[in-house]
Amino acid sequence: MIFLRYENWKSYLRFYPVTCLILLINIVMFIVLTVQGGSQNSLTLIRYGALINEAPFTDQLWRYVSAIFLHAGFDHLLFNSFAILVFAPPLERLLGSLRYVLLYLVTGIVGNVMSIAHYNMVAETTISVGASGAIYGIYGAFLYVALFQRSFMDDASRKTLYTLLGFGILFSFAVANINWTAHFGGLLSGFFLYGLMVRLTGQRKRH
């Protein structure tokens, strides 16, 4: 079962340095938001890099990256951090740190781009933050593994992934204030980007 974490903290830090760095950035930025006005305060979120589809912020392309590392409320941070902590490590070992961080950032950006495009299309203002686009990018990569690299994933892990995606899709549409377009964009881009990576650069040896 690749999604069970057996490592102690020392081993976790050594094996998954990029995942640890991502978690650290998320936590640090949450603390910064909290002490600077609150992580659910719109003005504070915008000040520190939230994605918003209103002028004069629409031309600030760096927000498509910064918003990935911001979270609105402790529950939001906790849920996303748990997903990264548990499900991201096998992908870091599989891809290697460089390709892994590239996939994480690109899928997070694609999720944000699709989110803004959706809200612009329906003429609604949005202030968007969170790592969910990148997290679904990780799920998309694992979906590729489950379908086309079946020897890389055991049956229990495959069933866990399908169940996770099923519930994720259900909650994305059933629960208010969940950015389903970011989830969908991350999932699709993760699936195709992972496939492109392994075809262009080869498959890293499994651990």
Image (spheres, rainbow, N blue to C red):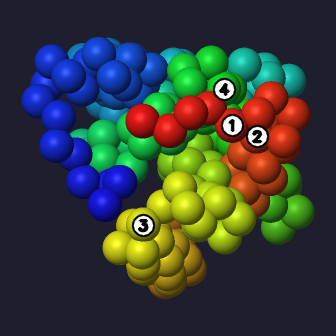
For the N terminus, which image quadrant?
Answer: bottom left
Residue 164 in view here: no
Q: Is residue 192 above or below residue 15?
A: below
For the point 66% across and 26% down, which residue is it? 99
Mark 2 and mark 1: span between their CA atoms? Answer: 5 Å
Image coordinates of residue 26 in percent, x first then y, are: 37, 26
* Label 2 CA crowd tier, 10 Å (few <14, some 14–19, many 20+): few
Q: Give the mark, 2 or 4, whose residue is nearer the N terminus.
A: 4
| Picture disc at residue 203 | 1
Left or right? Give the position of 118 relative to 86. right
Residue flagged by tag 3: what amino acid is it? Asp
Label 4 residue SS: helix
C-alpha span from label 3 to label 1? 18 Å
Q: Which residue is mark 4?
A: 99
- Tell me the residue that label 3 is attached to: 154
- Secondary structure, mark 1, is loop
* Camera-side residue of 24 and 159: 159
Q: Nearer the viewer, residue 40 or 175?
A: 175
* Numbered mark located on residue 198 in the image: 2
Gap in angstroms between the C-alphas marked 4 and 3:
23 Å
Q: Is residue 59 left or right of residue 62?
A: right
Cα distance between the residues tagged 3 and 2: 19 Å
Residue at left offset 63%, top offset 52%: 141
